[in-house]
Amino acid sequence: MIAMHGRDKEDRFAKVRARMLKWHLEGRNITDPRVLAVMAEVPREEFVPQSYQSQAYADGPLPIGRAQTISQPYIVALMTQELRVNQDYEVLEIGTGSGYQTAVLSKLVKKVYTMERFSVLSESAQAVLNKLGITNVEFYVGDGSCGWPEQRLPPLRRFDRIMITAAVPAIPEPLVEQLVDDGFIMAPVGYGGIQELVVCEKKKDKLFERRICGVRFVQLVGKYSFEE
């Protein structure tokens, strides 16, 4: 009976995941086949509290504790698509949160380095990714606005892509320094309740910005971001 219940649960989530893919992603110009395939594969229900699992594939954010949220599926897919990653890239993610975005990125890149301010969220995300058999992710608890600790990287190592999954008043300079030339860094930027999602390409230590859309994210607290 337990095995049957498990299959029923998987079937139920498979159906709503398929609807999410058709209506919330393909229906809103998520066109990268790699992104769509990963969004169909990664079980979002594993990353939300049990009391919210029935809403796992609704197109909206959900609380995950510590006044943080898991982003809506469309935004996760959009940010992943706009970051333009490939299997050779090493990506820095600022704001592990639930680990859902981390998992999506991990399927598309060589390695993800992810930073989270709250140890309880980092530990929870690690547990879920371990359960899913994802091994190409390195976790660190600390101030993401300061970038990945240099002592934990080989000399002169820089990231091909950087994704900030919380709002910043401006792109933190330490993160710009850790981005390769010709690399992309993405973030929701703004001071108010609504921010602008931007992708910036680094060219000779300068950032060239492309605006995507208005978004609403929790703030990134840190030395080079918002004060607590």
Image (cartoon, helix red, strand yellow):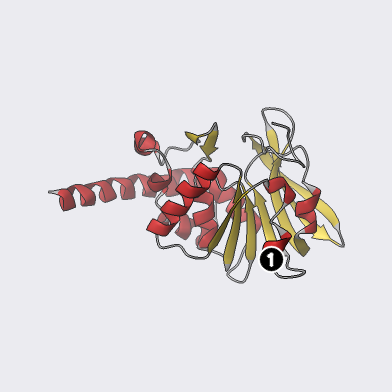
Answer with the quarter of the image where residue 83 lies. Answer: bottom right
Identify the residue shown where x is 47% and y is 53%: 126
In the displayed image of the protein, which residue is found farthest to the left?
Answer: 1
Question: Do we see residue 70 in this rendering?
Answer: yes
Q: Residue furthest front?
A: 151
- The three-letter code of the residue at mark 1 reads Leu
**Label 1's element?**
loop
Closer to the camera, 23 or 145? 145
Please indicate, yes or no, whether residue 28 appears anywhere in the rendered image: no
Residue in the image at 76% along x and 41% along y:
223
Q: Nearer the viewer, residue 130 or 105?
A: 130
Please name the residue that numbered disc 1 is placed on: 153
Looking at the picture, tell me which residue is in the foreground, 152 or 62. Answer: 152
Q: Position of residue 178 (x, y in %)?
A: 76, 59
Q: Residue at x 74, y 62 (%)?
A: 183
Foreground pick, 154 / 199: 154
Q: Pointer 1: residues within 10 angstroms few (<14), some, or many (20+)?
A: few
In the displayed structure, 10 sits above or below 34; it is above
Q: How many marks?
A: 1
**Residue 220 point in image, percent of width and height:** 67, 39
Residue 213 location in percent, x, y?
A: 67, 40
Q: Which quadrant: the C terminus? A: top right
From the viewer's perspective, is residue 223 above or below residue 136?
above
Left or right: where does residue 74 sit relative to residue 160? left
Q: Position of residue 95 (x, y in %)?
A: 60, 46
